[in-house]
């Protein structure tokens, strides 16, 4: 019977080979399925990390990174390595049996950071800054709207507003990607009979209270720099990213708080309540931000859970 050390090495070679096959397929298809492989790259490392932990998975990560240099271009290397890093941390959380809701948020945050790093790498390699990308997008939109005869408010065509939309979309895509990676990885691991914990309801997660004050402070600082921009572009971009991230953080927990309120006091709303929360994100964002602060920083969350238990 194979001993544990040999099994660990064999399993590492197997998941590395699976990772290499995906890299090779992506290269042979000219990156046609690159957007799909981004969601699949973390899974081999998640499986290995969940079984052996982060420390044992580091040599496997090094082997995967080497394969990405052999089979990928610059962008392929970046995406493969960042997704493998997300996979090793995700697998480590499963190995140490971290609370599943915390694991979900960790994967989402890492995916958002990967999206942010994507923009930094793009700017570095192309020599085009974020502001130049936004200005180019502004020119393209102006051309399209002139051809179609459509008019938009001047505020929506400003560089600051378009930069906000760009960063907001980056964060939203990162959150969505992290959620898909989390769900797909757990689904495959369960199919393979890996001993993974059952996910816990997001309503039972209590984020630290200080995060609400930090997110609100970042958003207020972002609002201040919109009226008086910082001279240093790197500081301005950092404040912009932190402000929008804080905005999304409070909005997300505001939606969770409102959904839990509807579930406790108006249980018949069902899917209509979810639709109303999503609409409110665009129509009454300040209200949902306030709900997020109250939900995290006060005892209202516990009050709702106590009410639902009675």
Image: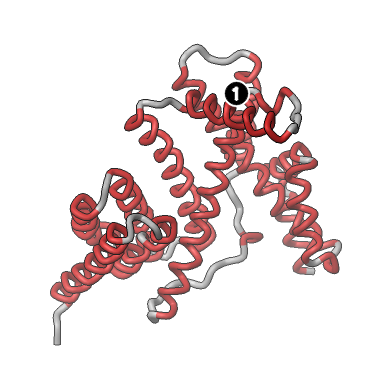
Query: Is residue 151 or residue 264 the one in the foreground?
Result: 151
Give the colour scheme of this rendering.
secondary structure
Residue closest to the eye, 83 or 194:
83
Residue drawn at (74%, 30%) of the image: 152
Which corner quadrant of the image does residue 62 belong to? bottom left
Whether residue 256 appears in this view of the structure is yes
Quick check: 161 above or below 255? above
Which image quadrant for residue 143? top right
Q: Position of residue 65 (x, y in %)?
A: 23, 52
**Residue corresponding to mark 1:** 159
Kindly state the secondary structure of the residue where label 1 is placed: helix
Q: Nearer the viewer, residue 289 or 173?
A: 173
Does any portion of residue 163 appear in the rendered image?
A: no
Q: Is residue 10 above or below residue 34?
A: below
Residue 175 lies, in percent from the top left, at: 54, 50
Would residue 232 appear left or right of 279 to someone viewing this image? left
Residue at 17%, 73% in the rendered image: 10
Rendering coords of residue 19 (x, y %)? 28, 64
Image coordinates of residue 285 in percent, x first then y, are 74, 40
């Amino acid at each position: 019977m194979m001993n544990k050390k040999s099994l660990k090495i064999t399993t590492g070679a197997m998941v590395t080979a699976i990772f290499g096959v995906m890299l090779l397929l992506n290269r042979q298809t000219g990156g046609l399925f690159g957007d799909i492989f981004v969601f699949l790259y973390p899974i081999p490392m998640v499986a290995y990390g969940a079984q052996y932990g982060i420390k044992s998975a580091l040599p496997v990560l090094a082997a995967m990174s080497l394969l990405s240099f052999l089979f990928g271009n610059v962008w392929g290397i970046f995406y493969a390595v960042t997704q493998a890093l997300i996979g090793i941390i995700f697998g480590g959380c499963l190995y140490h049996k971290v609370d599943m809701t915390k694991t979900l948020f960790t994967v989402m945050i890492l995916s958002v950071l990967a999206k942010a790093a994507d923009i930094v790498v793009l700017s570095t390699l192309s020599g085009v800054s974020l502001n130049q990308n936004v200005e180019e997008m502004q020119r393209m939109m102006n051309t399209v709207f002139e051809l179609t005869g459509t008019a938009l408010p001047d505020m929506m065509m400003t560089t600051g507003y378009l930069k906000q939309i760009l960063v907001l979309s980056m964060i939203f895509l990162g959150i969505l990607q992290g959620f898909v990676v989390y769900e797909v990885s757990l689904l495959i691991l369960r199919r393979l009979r890996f001993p993974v914990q059952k996910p816990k309801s997001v309503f039972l997660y209590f984020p630290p209270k200080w995060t609400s004050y930090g997110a609100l402070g970042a958003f207020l600082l972002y609002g201040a720099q919109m009226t008086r921009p910082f001279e240093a572009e790197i500081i301005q971009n950092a404040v912009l990213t932190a402000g929008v991230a804080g905005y999304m953080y409070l909005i997300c927990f505001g939606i969770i708080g409102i959904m839990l309120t509807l579930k406790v006091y108006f249980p018949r709303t069902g899917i209509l309540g979810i639709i109303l929360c999503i609409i409110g994100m665009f129509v009454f964002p300040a209200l949902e931000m306030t709900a997020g602060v109250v939900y995290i920083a006060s005892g209202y969350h516990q009050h709702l859970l106590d009410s639902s238990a009675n």
